[in-house]
Image (cartoon, grey):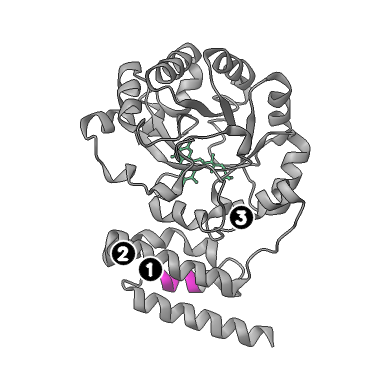
Amino acid sequence: MPKNKLNINDIKVIQAPLAGISDIVFRGQIRKYSDSCLMTTEMISSEMLCNNPNPRIIQFEEFEYPLAFQLVGHKVDKMVKAAKILAPYASMIDINCGCPVKKVVVSHDGSAMMKTPELACEILSAIKEATGLMVSAKFRLGWSKTQENYIEFAQSLEKAGADFVTLHARTRADMYQGSADWNKIKLLVDELKIPVFANGDIKTLDDAKKCLEITNAKGVSIGRGIMGDFSLPYRIEKYINEGIILPEPDLVEKIAMLREHLRLEVINMGEINGVKFMRKFYNYYISSVRNASKYRAKLVILETEKEINKVLDEILHIHSLDCV
Ligand SMILES: Cc1cc2nc3c(=O)[nH]c(=O)nc-3n(C[C@H](O)[C@H](O)[C@H](O)COP(=O)(O)O)c2cc1C
């Protein structure tokens, strides 16, 4: 089987797409732990890709496979053209029907696609036919609490040929507030023949266990839970496949992950951009530290890798004193 081909039965964990986060370095770090987690690129605008077929956002390495490229857009011709550009490199294409951000939905993209299910289906089947790849869609419960249409939406995607779906169990109106409603994922699992992956608020191995018990989903899709712990997908897979519960990395291990993440982003983007990029992650890596917000405030104004490593040394020193 070619390296980039995918058997969905092998997939228990999907790394959820995270714009501005799940770049080539992020995905590569997950792959150091897990051979089988399905990686996903950040969302790629089909319009942008058609105008510039070689942007940085589609950067990837072969060792990342299996790798889904996620497309966002609502024009059938542009989505098909973009998918054809990606097809030689992609294990599969995922269609973004869940992004709630205003500038995306005003263009009828992302979760606005849930208002036009026929169009979403047309895009999905056209991409499948044009590329011969597996195609999935990631969506929410609906536009708002009074407009929840995730079951009908998913049933039409299934008819249109979707290979699987991922449900983020919030509405567009919820944005990221409140809790994901895993009971609704269970309702969807009961209605579909194709696999359903559960998404939303799975931040630990315990969350994954609970979510799978409630939903009976084929697997889980994890976004923010991986920020600050690249081993999470592997630990969840180990539990699902072998019933083995591996411990969460401790602070020393998390800081080692952070240093490596920083090092690789600096190599990838240069020191100025790499250091700025990493400011999004500190909260996640050092959340367990006493006075975490004080250290985060220190870290986000630093401009060199060396200065950051010095503060990380300080955190580890204080932490070792706390532990005696
Ligand atoms: C910073 C950020 C960027 C995101 N970018 C995307 C994206 O590009 N495509 C997408 O389908 N969802 C995107 N999402 C949504 C996540 O994939 C996921 O559905 C959501 O965060 C809930 O899962 P979690 O609780 O595991 O993070 C993004 C979420 C965040 C926080």
The kind of residue on which mark 1 rests is Arg
Comparing 124 with 4, the one in front is 4
Comparing 262 with 146, the one in front is 262
**Neighbours of disc 2 within 10 Å: few (<14), some (14-19), many (20+):** few
Q: Which residues are magenta?
A: 295-299
The kind of residue on which mark 3 rests is Leu
Name above or below for residue 316 compared with residue 190.
below
Residue 171 in sight in this render:
yes
Confirm or reject: label 2 Cβ below 8 Å from ligand 1.
Answer: no
**What residue is rendered at 44% in x and 38% in y?**
4
Rounded to the nearest angstrom, the CA distance separating label 2 from label 3 is 24 Å
Q: Are marks 2 and 1 in contact (CB under 8 Å)?
A: yes
**What residue is rendered at 60% in x and 39% in y?**
11
Q: Which residue is mark 3?
A: 232
Q: Which residue is mark 1?
A: 263
Q: Position of residue 228 (x, y in %)?
A: 54, 60
Q: Which residue is mark 2?
A: 267
**Neighbours of disc 1 within 10 Å: few (<14), some (14-19), many (20+):** some
| Picture quadrant of residue 70 | top left
Name above or below for residue 221 compared with residue 92.
below
Name above or below for residue 97 compared with residue 25.
above
Q: Is residue 102 left or right of residue 273?
A: right
**What kind of element bears circle 1?**
helix
Q: Position of residue 243 (x, y in %)?
A: 77, 51
Q: Could you tell which of marks 2 and 3 lies nearer the N-terminus?
A: 3
**What residue is rendered at 52% in x and 35% in y?**
6
| Picture quadrant of residue 180 | top right
Query: Magenta part mainly helix, strand or loop?
Result: helix
The kind of residue on which mark 2 rests is Ile
Rounded to the nearest angstrom, the CA distance separating label 2 from label 1 is 6 Å
**What residue is rendered at 43% in x and 50% in y?**
63
